Amino acid sequence: MLLPRVYPILDTGLLARHGIAPAAAAEAVLNAGAQILQLRHKAFFLRADYEVAQSISDLCRQAGALFVINDRADIALLLGAALHLGQEDLPPAAARVLSNEMAIGFSTHNEHQLLAGDREPVDYLAIGPIFATGSKENPDPVVGLEELRRLRPLTRKPLVAIGGITRAQAGKVWQAGADSIAVIGDLLPEIGERTMEWLALARGRGVYA
């Protein structure tokens, strides 16, 4: 699986605190040129939330971008989206039984989890938090750049670095071995403009943006 170097994640809780509608945020990200977009919704999935996810799925399809749903295999299947799972979610092997076609990503936070994740039937792995982050209520211990560099050779799967990464730090994260950088907080407040800046950073390195 070839991952874009920049992986925007729209956290509905974070967007709500800024008064930004998820569909509007998605449209801004996609208009800026992003080729992947994850919707992270940690609250209960109401019908209205499904309708929002459906509208974002349509926007991604029109833009030719991969749409990723966090945690919910059922919603991902209904929308024909990719799925991203965490350590406490449905086991990746169980999700794979549901579909051989669905792209699946899996979050890891240390060497043990990364090695275990490498054996799972997933298409890519995430590792983090690379830096301290405010996007989670109970974040895992910080991984850091040196540990990212040490862990990178332990898997041949595409590796997404996540957690507290800003544009100022992006170059060092890519240099440490990340194939892609997940961006959450640094998309705000001007989501479209920030996404364009992130994509320009990736293009400046001569890599797939």
Image: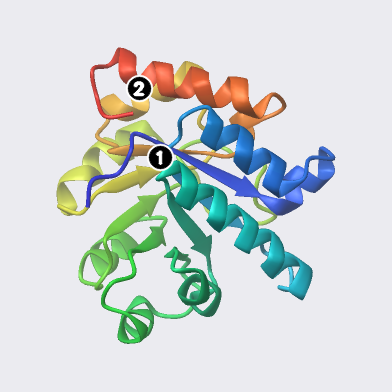
The spot of residue 119 in percent (x, y) is 20, 71
Q: Is residue 45 left or right of residue 27?
A: right
1 vs 2, front mark? 1
Q: Nearer the viewer, residue 97 or 64?
A: 64
Residue 158 place in picture, x, y as percent: 24, 49
The residue shown at (15%, 46%) is: 153
Label of residue 202 in the image:
2
Residue 173 can be seen in this image: yes
What is the C-alpha distance between the residues marked 1 and 2?
13 Å
Q: Observer-nearest residue: 110 or 170?
A: 170
Q: Secondary structure at mark 1?
A: loop
Residue farthest to the front, as pictured: 62
User: Three-letter amino acid code at disc 1?
Assistant: Gln
Residue in front for this viewpoint, 106 or 154: 106
**Residue 162, disc:** none
Tell me the kind of residue under disc 2.
Ala
Quadrant of the frame with the C terminus: top left
> In the rendering, at what x and y percent does residue 146 appear?
31, 33
Residue 65 image point, x, y percent: 42, 46
Q: Residue at x 45, y 21 (%)?
A: 169
Describe residue 100's horizontal placement relative to residue 89 as left or right. Answer: left
Q: Quick one: SS at disc 2?
A: helix
Colouring chosen for the image of the structure? rainbow
- Tell me if mark 1 has few (under 14), some (14-19) or many (20+) residues whose alpha carbon lies within 10 angstroms of its own: many
**Residue at position x 31%, y 28% from top?**
174
The residue under label 1 is 35
**Quick check: can you spot residue 164?**
no
- Mark 1 and mark 2 lie on one chain; the one further toward the N terminus is 1
Residue at image location 27% in from the left, 38% down from the top: 179
User: Would residue 189 appear left or right of 164 to someone viewing this image?
Assistant: right
Q: Quadrant of residue 40?
A: bottom right
